[in-house]
Amino acid sequence: MRTKSILIVLLCTSIVTSTAQDIITKMNGDDIQAIVIEVLPTSVKYKKYNNQKGPLYTLKKSEIFMINYENGSKDVFTTQNSDVMEGSSATIYFYRPKKFANGKTKIIVGTVEPDEVLVGLKNGRWYEMDYEHLGDRQFVAGVFSLNKEIYELDVEHNETYYVKCTVLTKGLKVMAELTFVGKATALKEMEGLKEQEDSLVD
């Protein structure tokens, strides 16, 4: 009986979700027809209304003027209540332990939103980056092709993060993988690695 109740609740929720439409108005005046999934301290997660089975997007509150919800309520955002200060950033270390296999190809690391390449990491190197896009971020990685797996990280002001970048061979596929690790582990694994001064090297 309990299982049936849960199924009914899920069915009702999916019906409401499929018909509800929120409007996100950005600071530049653009409107996004969306389904708002979650409102976080520094960002808003949403799905596009016309592609509800598609990817989850993240938008910084500093980019949003207002959200008009389907039920008629509103949230108005300003730079003062977004908890994001101009010039705020975090420090991210990307590092790649030295391996003999597949060592000649770079691991490319980027983000989903904004769609940008952050670093092309060489074998046995590490790279330090000041990262200004705070809040929940989605990272992706690739070698010859993009790994479909998305790695999520809540990036906070003045924090430091360590991202281990590795190459895995799965059958005939060579895939990149990211792992968020603690400081002690990262510093130990980074011993002997060389600093990469440019984010994208030839």
Image (cartoon, rainbow, N blue to C red):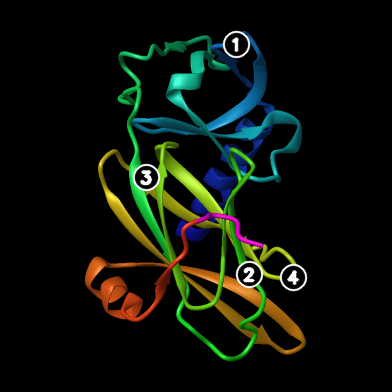
Residue at left offset 56%, top offset 52%: 7
Helix, strand or loop at mark 4: loop
Asked whether the beta carbons under mark 2 and mark 1 sit within 8 Å of each other, the answer is no
Badge 2: how crowded within 10 Å, few (<14), some, or many (20+)?
many
Pointer 1 residue:
28
- Of circles 4 and 2, the one toward us is 2
Pointer 4 residue:
144
Q: Tell me, yes or no, whether the highlighted magenta stretch contains residue 120.
A: no
Tell me which numbered mark, 4 or 2, is placed earlier along the sequence: 2
Badge 3: how crowded within 10 Å, few (<14), some, or many (20+)?
many
Tell me which numbered mark, 3 or 2, is placed earlier along the sequence: 2
Q: Is residue 160 left or right of residue 58?
A: left
Quadrant position of residue 201: bottom right
Tell me which numbered mark, 2 or 1, is placed earlier along the sequence: 1
- Residues 19 and 50: in front is 50
Pinpoint residue 132: horizontal percent, then vertical percent. Answer: 42, 36
Q: In this picture, is 10 found above or below 45? A: below
Helix, strand or loop at mark 1: loop
Q: In this picture, is 146 found above or below 133? A: below
Q: Amino acid at mark 2?
A: Lys
* Mark-to-mark CA distance, 3 and 2: 24 Å
Q: In this picture, is 202 found above or below 165? A: above
Q: How many marks?
A: 4
Asked whether the beta carbons under mark 1 and mark 3 sit within 8 Å of each other, the answer is no
- Residues 20 and 175: in front is 175
**Magenta range:** 198-202
